[in-house]
Amino acid sequence: MAEVRAEIDRLDREIVALLGQRMRYIEAAARIKPTRCAVRDEWRKNDVIDKAAAKAREVNFPERLVRDVYEVLVEGSIAHEFVKWDRRRSGEE
């Protein structure tokens, strides 16, 4: 059991590192998008979630779980992007 837990912990560290990299791209998007209303893009949100769900099916991972996780991830990313967009436009960044 200790080996299994150690591997789960290792994977969790890798996942969080990848999520950090993903967030840097969200921040880049906040710098690029010309208007605040461009931050929320429902088509793109659905596309990201659908692509993650397709990968889940491919690797035999519960699709519903991926959709739920990605809903939270994408909404959190949008919220973070709004904060970055607003700060940049106000001169705080």
Image (spheres, rainbow, N blue to C red):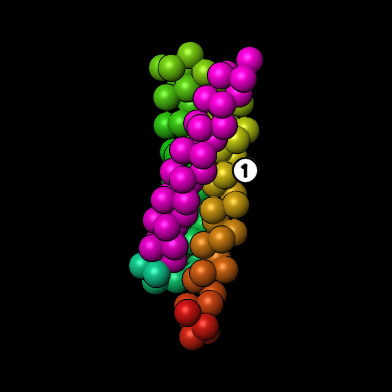
Q: Residue at x 52, y 18 (%)?
A: 61
Q: Is residue 11 above or below residue 71?
A: above
Q: Residue at x 45, y 71 (%)?
A: 35
Q: Residue at x 51, y 48 (%)?
A: 42
**Whole-percent x, y for residue 14 in the image:** 46, 38
How many numbered markers are drawn? 1
**On the image, numbered disc 1 is attached to which residue?**
72
Q: Residues within 10 Å of mark 1 (few under 14, many from 20)?
A: few
Q: Nearer the viewer, residue 43 or 14?
A: 14
**Whole-percent x, y for residue 6 in the image:** 56, 26
Q: Nearer the viewer, residue 31 or 34?
A: 31
Q: Looking at this view, name the residue that lies furthest to the front.
A: 2
Q: Nearer the viewer, residue 93 or 12?
A: 12
**Whole-percent x, y for residue 71 in the image:** 59, 40
Q: Is residue 18 visible?
A: yes
Considering the image in quadrants, where does the N terminus appear?
top right
Q: Residue at x 47, y 51 (%)?
A: 20
Q: Magenta includes 47?
A: no
**59 on left or right of 40:** left
Q: Nearer the viewer, residue 83 or 38?
A: 83
Q: Identify the amino acid type marked 1.
A: Val
**28 on left or right of 61:** left
Q: Is residue 10 above or below residue 16?
A: above
Q: Magenta includes 19?
A: yes
Q: Is residue 64 visible?
A: no
Q: Looking at this view, name the residue that lies furthest to the bottom.
A: 91
Residues in magenta, as a range: 1-30
**Whole-percent x, y for residue 40 in the image:** 52, 57
Secondary structure mostly seen in the magenta stretch = helix
Considering the numbered disc 1 on the image, is that residue within a helix, a strand or a loop? helix
